[in-house]
């Protein structure tokens, strides 16, 4: 057990219990937060957390008193320190959830009882080479291996940075990369819809309840991420601007519970212009939405006004749109593209209409232009008109396929 006590100004006392002592087990040391770090409360908290982790380890190992204990910290005993000192400071809840699943299912069974300072590069390389699917025994996909690699490296990087281990065994472990066969298989999978397919798709969506039709149509036209559109509320819709404001998303916390959280990056926040015909359909749907709320005997949404909700105003679980989308495609015999592929489809529609990469970057709210360029690599002429104008003619009511 370890804790921090504020002494005054930028000075703090780090306290840890020495398990080797029965009487007066507390050991403490004083530290002063560097002036440049002290300007930020978040950086101060992170710096102190790391210093506390190092002090607690020094007390635990006996190094704080100049004595050395034969029993060093095990891999599994280091995980709580890593989670508090690194994961909670640098990862979102969903990322922590996924990473902890990897740690619990893969890393702890293999390295849990081993002293973290005695795990070698050769052990790790051999282990990575033998990783297979636990159910089928088949080799793991590179992306799965990469996630395991990132989780493992994060832990050993922290241990090395905090002085828990003298050298980082992950430095000699090669980052997983895709084979030519995997690359070919990935390239062969359909990632976006063509303009002609979008026209048919927008019409086919009329088979769904209005809320889902507008959700998926909005994803195609606006390039929204899954959780962003789930978090949109009526006050975020501006009919005068013909745009939707994005500043939050529905995601998961580290316990797997659905929550309203921040958007992916600072650049993800902003207005997304939408075709007028889509905004008009939202306006019409609002009357249906308001009637549903009025007739609801027990509204559970509180003061939240999610446009797309699971009933009684309750936010959807983030995976619900993905499942609904897959079922819709299968039922209607439509070519399968992942739900996130609708975001790429939005970008490709603009690219094919002549939009330049900078315009697409701003519309999809990518942090870097390189990200946009890597996805939409084919060349085209410069944009001829505002990006959203290209989407006006996709009004399903104008298409010959419309019911």
Image (spheres, grey):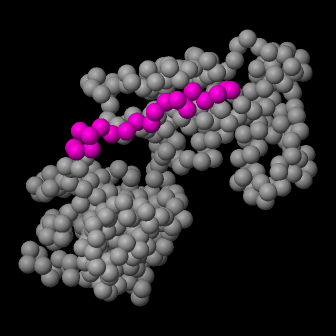
* 183 sits to left or right of 175: left
| 75 lies left or right of 98 | right
Residue 170 is covered by the magenta coloring: yes
Q: Position of residue 274 (x, y in %)?
A: 34, 78
Magenta stretch: includes residue 13: no
Against 263, residue 397 (above or below) is below
Residue 284 seen anywhere in this rendered image of the structure: no
31 and 358: which one is in front?
358
Quarter of the image for the N terminus: give it.
top right
One can see residue 72 in this view = yes
Write the start and end of the magenta stretch as one range: 165-185
Please indicate whether residue 299 sits to the left or right of residue 82 in the image: left
The answer to which quarter of the image holds residue 204 is bottom left
Q: Which residue is at 19% across, 49% downward?
A: 188
Seen at 84% across and 16% down, the residue is: 67
Q: Is residue 172 left or right of residue 362?
A: right
In the figure, 320 relative to 84: above or below?
A: below
Q: Where is residue 397 in the image (x, y as percent from the top left)?
A: 16, 80
């Amino acid at each position: 057990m370890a804790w921090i006590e504020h002494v005054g100004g930028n000075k703090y006392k780090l306290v840890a219990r020495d398990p080797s002592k029965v009487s007066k087990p507390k050991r403490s040391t004083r530290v002063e937060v560097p002036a440049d770090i002290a300007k930020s409360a978040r950086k101060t908290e992170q710096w102190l957390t790391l210093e506390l982790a190092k002090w607690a380890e020094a007390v635990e190992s006996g190094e704080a008193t100049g004595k050395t204990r034969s029993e060093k910290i095990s891999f599994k005993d280091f995980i709580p320190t890593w989670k508090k000192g690194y994961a909670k400071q640098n990862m979102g809840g969903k990322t922590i959830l996924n990473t902890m699943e990897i740690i619990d299912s893969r890393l702890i069974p293999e390295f849990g009882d081993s002293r973290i300072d005695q795990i070698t590069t050769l052990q790790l390389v051999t282990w990575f080479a033998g990783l297979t699917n636990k159910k089928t025994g088949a080799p793991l996909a590179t992306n799965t291996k990469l996630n395991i690699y990132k989780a493992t490296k994060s832990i050993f990087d922290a241990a090395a940075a905090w002085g828990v281990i003298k050298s980082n065994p992950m430095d000699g472990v090669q980052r997983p990369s895709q084979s030519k066969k995997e690359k070919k298989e990935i390239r062969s999978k359909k990632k976006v819809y063509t303009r002609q397919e979008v026209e048919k798709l927008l019409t086919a969506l009329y088979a769904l309840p209005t809320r889902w039709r507008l959700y998926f149509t909005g994803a195609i036209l606006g390039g929204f991420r899954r959780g962003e559109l789930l978090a949109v509320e009526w006050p975020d819709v501006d009919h005068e601007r013909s745009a939707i404001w994005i500043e939050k998303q529905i995601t998961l916390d580290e316990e797997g519970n659905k929550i309203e959280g921040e958007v992916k990056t600072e650049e993800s926040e902003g207005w997304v212009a939408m075709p007028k015909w889509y905004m008009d359909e939202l306006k019409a749907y609002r009357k249906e939405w308001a009637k549903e709320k009025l007739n609801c005997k027990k509204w559970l949404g509180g003061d939240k006004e999610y446009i797309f909700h699971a009933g009684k105003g309750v936010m959807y679980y983030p995976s619900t749109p993905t499942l609904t989308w897959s079922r819709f495609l299968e039922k209607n015999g439509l070519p399968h593209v992942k739900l996130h592929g609708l975001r790429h489809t939005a970008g490709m529609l603009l690219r094919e209409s002549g939009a330049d990469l900078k315009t697409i970057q701003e519309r999809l709210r990518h942090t870097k232009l390189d990200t946009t360029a890597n996805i939409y690599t084919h060349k085209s002429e410069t944009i001829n008109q505002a990006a959203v104008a290209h989407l006006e003619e996709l009004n399903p009511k104008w298409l010959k396929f419309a019911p």
